[in-house]
Image (tube, helix red, strand yellow):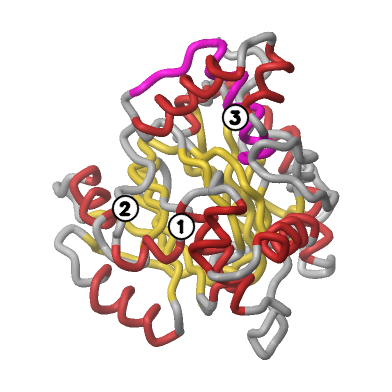
Amino acid sequence: MFPSMCGPDDPVPSFLPGVFPLPSDDGSSGLSDTDRALIRALQADGRQSFVALSKAIGVPERTIRRRVNQLLADQVIQITAVTDPAVLGYRVAALVGLHLDGGRNVRAVIASVTRVAAVDYAVITTGRYDALVEVLCRDTSELLSVVHESLAPLPGVRGVEIFPYVQLHYQEPEWDAAQEKARNGVRDVRGSLDATDRKIVAELTGDGRLAFSVIGDRLGMSESQVRKRVTRLLAERIIRITAIANPRSLGFENQVWVAIRCTPGHSVADLAETLTRIPSITYVAACAGRFDIFAEAVCRSTQDMARLVDGEIRTLTGVTHTELMLCLDLYYRAVQPPLEPE
């Protein structure tokens, strides 16, 4: 991302997919209290104006403009539209566990993984898998192609295990809201997008603060038409516009994936829905394969993570087995609608 002095009514260059920088060992990560307040505010509403941010945080507007643009330029945040991938036209999604060749640089291997177009998310992990990768596809044929022709043959990838999603139950990109379940997250989306909506969302995916007038010019629409459509999509919670950030930038020490097997005879869907209501959990997907559910959690400390797993997940009725995979490094790419959605 290139720096610019722009607001939600000014064009900003699109984000270039990459790695969210991890903080330094002392946890400071070079961010000021103002930076952290800005990230939190933009996670709640990525299109807040600089004037509104200035009033809320108590810092001059000029400073707000400079810091927001620096956070974008440094790739500490990406402001994007978030929705259920199925709404965009990705009918098949999966989490893929990667086993890597121990003789290669892990970050270099994962960097090549993230260049695969279908990959929107990857984490380097501890535990059974060296990395977890989410892929989004239009159908099962495309999924097989992505995994076996694009991921498995990559230098450094020793083996793959696919967990196709049966249902995405929950995703909450705002880390503070996930702690208290202050919002409902993006879940069980019933709305739909027509061709024009998809084009608008594609623009907002690249830059969630892009001016409606710019979107209108690009798509041959009036600013008011764009505004009306975006307002409806937001009101119906079909999309959210939020700042995506590495959890550690806001002081969350641990990000973890919990792989869960469900007790035979117990409803996987019911267990998944129960998990969505537990504080700290940010993502829940029921899947096929060795595990029935994958849940992501963001915790403030190792103690919070232990409490979550031992006290709230492993004790749930229906949980028969869990495996933890601590996240060591995070990669993220905003999800664009398919070029030719069916």
What type is the residue that disc 3 sits on?
A: Leu
Q: In terms of depth relative to the viewer, which is nearer, 16 or 63?
A: 63
Find residue 165 and report its horizontal and vertical position in percent: 43, 38
Residue 196 is covered by the magenta coloring? yes
- Under circle 3, the secondary element is helix
Question: Which secondary structure class fits the magenta region best?
Answer: helix
Mark 1, residue position: 174
Find residue 327 and report its horizontal and vertical position in percent: 57, 68
> Picture quarter containing residue 217?
top right
- Identified at 31% across, 65% down, the residue is 321
- Identified at 34% across, 30% down, the residue is 236
Q: Is residue 110 above or below residue 176?
A: above
Q: Is residue 246 visible?
A: yes
Q: Earlier in the sequence, mark 1 or mark 3?
A: 3
> Picture quarter containing residue 130?
bottom right
Q: Is residue 117 left or right of residue 231?
A: right
Cα distance in 3D space between marks 1 and 3: 29 Å
Q: In terms of depth relative to the viewer, which is nearer, 7 or 42?
A: 7
Q: Earlier in the sequence, mark 1 or mark 2?
A: 1
What type is the residue that disc 2 sits on?
A: Arg
Cα distance in 3D space between marks 2 and 3: 32 Å
Mark 3, residue position: 143
Residue extent of the magenta highlight? 191-210
Find residue 11 and report its horizontal and vertical position in percent: 75, 35
Mark 2, residue position: 183
What number of labels is visible? 3
Q: Is residue 85 above or below residue 130?
A: above
